[in-house]
């Protein structure tokens, strides 16, 4: 039997999913579509009786393929909910607050009918980055309040977006052994990061807050979501709604720090409290995965770096990469 996550009882966790359309300019591997991925995720959630899950998807890919809106129908018909994640998925660090707010509004015009079906209007900051200056954060927070949105952070992630490119390479090369190895590493990361980040949060808060987890709408998640959820349940995780998670002050109150770094809420609270976050990010594991099944022109830097540039090009801005230290 797996060692429990906490001596205080089960960890409560609200699962969430970002970017059901992936990102503009990032195709799905051959044999995968956004529709196939979302059906796989819904099947996994239904199999393990998860409560309704919120998704937060940047909407820019729909500019190239309007059939992607079908994904939100599939998602909603399975009993899940939709929030706002802006249109282009630019970090608030890289654009002005006025540009960012306009991007939130642009996305709402496209998916308002799905947002309005949800019991709560949630917004998730792109990359969970709340801005590199207090002024930017305050501007956007003020807008969200006036627009009736609650910002929904992430408190526990396992860097699953860093598996997108390596997993794609294993599929492209037909290397089944490498593909299964990457799947195992995804589950390993999901379990290890849950254990690490819940322990960090417990040390910071002196209790176990309700956590908000994260997956992305990718081929890798389509093929491993059931294993991840099964592993979490074996650890005694109790899945709850995002509404329940947001009633916990550790999620409802934004940590009182400003950082440009790629950090979730648990990491930000830890920085504020001076608590070490050893093992997060899981740099050694990610370095192993980054090296699997090499293909010329398909490094993480080349693929995801291009995607980052795509998010800010409409604003005439430039991304910076020193925020990411995995």
Image (tube, grey):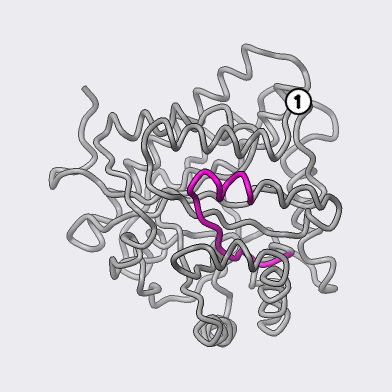
Q: Is residue 310 above or below residue 197?
A: below
Q: Which residue is painted at 47% across and 40% down in the image?
A: 282
Q: Is residue 8 above or below residue 89?
A: above
- Provide residue 128's location: percent of width, then percent of height: 54, 62
Q: Is residue 220 above or below residue 149?
A: above
> Of helix, strand and loop, which one carries label 1?
loop
Instruction: Describe residue 238's horizontal placement relative to residue 259 as left or right.
Output: left
Q: Which residue is painted at 28% across and 66% down in the image?
A: 248
Nearer-the-camera pick, 149 or 71: 71
Q: Is residue 58 magenta?
A: no
What residue occupies the far left of the structure in this picture?
A: 8
Magenta residue span:
73-87
- Provide residue 40's location: percent of width, then percent of height: 57, 32
Tally the marks.
1
Q: Is residue 86 magenta?
A: yes
Q: Which residue is painted at 29% across and 70% down in the image?
A: 249
Nearer-the-camera pick, 70 or 22: 70
Quarter of the image where one finds residue 130 = bottom right
- Provide residue 90's location: percent of width, then percent of height: 70, 65
Instruction: Describe residue 124's horizontal placement relative to residue 204 as left or right.
Output: right
At label 1, counting other C-alpha atoms closer than 10 Å, the crowd grade (few under 14, some 14-19, many 20 or more) is few
Nearer-the-camera pick, 104 or 197: 104
Q: Which residue is painted at 22% across and 55% down in the image?
A: 208
- Provide residue 211's location: percent of width, then percent of height: 34, 54
Nearer-the-camera pick, 179 or 268: 179
Q: Which residue is mark 1?
A: 31
Quarter holding the N terminus?
top left
């Amino acid at each position: 039997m797996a060692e429990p996550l906490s001596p205080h009882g089960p960890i409560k966790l609200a699962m969430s999913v970002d970017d059901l359309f992936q990102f503009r300019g990032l195709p799905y591997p051959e044999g995968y579509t956004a529709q196939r991925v979302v059906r796989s995720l819904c099947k996994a959630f239904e199999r393990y009786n998860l409560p309704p899950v919120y998704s937060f998807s940047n909407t820019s890919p729909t500019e190239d393929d309007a059939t992607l809106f079908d994904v939100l129908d599939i998602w909603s018909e399975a009993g899940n909910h939709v929030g706002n994640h802006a249109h282009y998925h630019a970090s608030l660090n890289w654009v002005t607050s006025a540009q960012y707010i306009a991007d939130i509004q642009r996305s709402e015009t496209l998916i308002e009918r799905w947002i309005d079906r949800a019991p709560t209007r949630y917004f998730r900051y792109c990359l969970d980055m709340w801005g590199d200056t207090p002024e930017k954060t305050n501007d956007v927070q003020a807008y969200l309040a006036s627009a009736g949105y609650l910002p929904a952070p992430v408190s526990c992630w396992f860097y699953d977006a860093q598996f997108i490119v390596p997993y794609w390479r294993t599929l492209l090369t037909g290397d089944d052994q490498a593909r299964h190895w990457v799947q195992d590493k995804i589950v390993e990361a999901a379990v290890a990061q849950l254990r690490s980040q819940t322990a960090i949060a417990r040390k910071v808060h002196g209790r176990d807050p309700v956590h908000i987890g994260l997956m992305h709408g990718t081929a890798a998640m389509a093929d491993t979501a059931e294993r991840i959820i099964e592993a979490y349940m074996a650890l005694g995780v109790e899945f709850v709604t995002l509404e329940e998670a947001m009633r916990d002050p550790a999620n409802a109150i934004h940590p009182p720090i400003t950082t440009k770094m790629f950090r979730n809420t648990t990491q930000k609270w830890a920085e504020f409290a001076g608590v070490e976050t050893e093992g997060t990010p899981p740099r050694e594991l990610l370095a192993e995965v980054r090296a699997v099944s090499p293909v010329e022109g398909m490094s993480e830097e080349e693929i995801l770096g291009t995607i980052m540039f795509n998010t800010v090009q409409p604003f005439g801005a430039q991304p910076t990469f020193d925020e990411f230290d995995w």
